[in-house]
Image: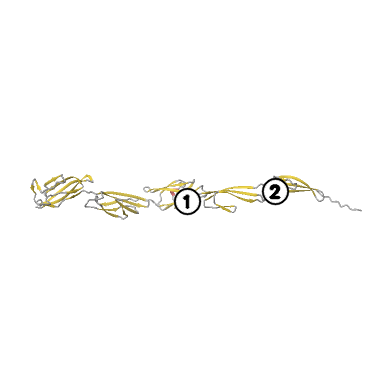
Amino acid sequence: MKNLHLIIDHRVTTYDSIASCDPYTWIDGITYDASISDVMHLLQTIHGCDSTVVLEFTKQTHKFTELYDTICRGVSYLFGGKEYSETGVYTDSLQTSSECDSLVQLNLHVLEPPTLDFTRDHDCDSRIYTITAHCDVPYFEWSSFPDDPALTGHTHDRTIQVRPTTHMTYILFADYKDLLTCPNTKSVNLSPLLKPHALIEYTPEFLTYDQLHLSAISRCTNEETRNWLVNDNDMGDQERISYLADPATDDSVVVVLTAHHGICHDTDMVVIPFRKATIWAPNAFTPEESTNNMFFIRYLGITDYRIDLYTRGGVLVWHSDDMNEGWDGTYKGKPCPQDAYVWIIHYRDVTAPKNLLSKKGTVTLLR
């Protein structure tokens, strides 16, 4: 009796799942460059049975990512393990989990800090500063320390007006946008404005050959410092000054006093005339002598001359309109007695011809 051992092999079907970024050559000798499924290839087992292999091929693609970013000049950007600080296009290559290349491209733009400045004007009478911003970016903002309520509602105005009542710092912030992209700031310190008042008190009212010294004193208010000028000569900052006029060069004396308080100032100016009309008269004469025997008036810088000479009793004994004429000590052709006589001169000063002036004196007639 014989025994039969029967072994039955089954057909085998297997699946070959492939994912690749590159073209793939399969066991059938064909190179696949696109995703495909249900491609079959027939083989035989060791027992001679059919074995079917099914290909499921997934063609993956390389990944590309593009980035855009900005930095401010002076700041570096870390990308792909390197630092960049100039505008440019930079790439970095990575690998995905399927070993495909992943390309990242960075488009980097480097911003220059905004150009930032402002102009400042002030009005000492109203005690107001006017500040105007000058910047080449669209976003700017004002702030202050301590906080100034005058900025409320005006922090984004290009021109602001402020009236600080204490020492204040005003800050101008500017950027390309309000996200701290590339900011720049500029500040200014302002003090309260207070206008001084300049006032000169001086003597004499006018200068003459007999009075050449001028004295002036400051009557300023609200000033911190002061400065004197006399005929464009710096006379310092003291409270009181004096000046000696020079008849040869000074037709008048111009005194200027400037009072300062911070950036505010005020000026007072006076012009003190130099009356150069001068009269010299002898105090005695003797008609019987060979010299000094007439009463002559000597003068300088006068016009419209008239002289009247009286006895002490008020009798007019001599009158003349001729500046070159003198008195010989007679009245109506007869000698006048020895005595003191009063003379009065009316004249006009060539430096102020509209004003009629007078001068009085006495002369003694000796016999």
Residue indicated by mark 2: 19
How many numbered marks appear?
2
- Position of residue 130 measured from the top left corner of the image (x, y, whole percent): 41, 47
Question: Seen from this angle, which residue lies furthest left?
Answer: 334
Q: Nearer the viewer, mark 2 or mark 1?
A: 2
Give the class, few, some or many, for how many residues have Cα within 10 Å of label 1's Cα (few <14, many ≥20).
Answer: some
Q: Is residue 151 left or right of residue 339?
A: right
- Position of residue 333 measured from the top left corner of the image (x, y, whole percent): 8, 46
Which three-letter amino acid code belongs to the residue tagged 1?
Thr
Question: Seen from this angle, which residue lies furthest bottom?
Answer: 238
Q: Is residue 5 left or right of residue 116?
A: right
Residue 19 or residue 165, whichever sits in front: 19
Q: Is residue 84 left or right of residue 231?
A: right
Q: CA distance from mark 2 to mark 1?
A: 56 Å
Marking on residue 140: none
Q: Which residue is found at the position 63% from the left and 51% from the top?
A: 94
- Position of residue 304 measured from the top left corner of the image (x, y, whole percent): 18, 44
Indicate the secondary structure of the residue bearing disc 2. Answer: strand
Marking on residue 185: 1
Residue 119 or residue 351, whichever sits in front: 351
Q: CB under 8 Å between callouts 2 and 1?
A: no
Which three-letter amino acid code belongs to the residue tagged 2?
Ala
Question: Seen from this angle, which residue lies furthest right?
Answer: 1
Indicate the secondary structure of the residue bearing disc 1. Answer: strand
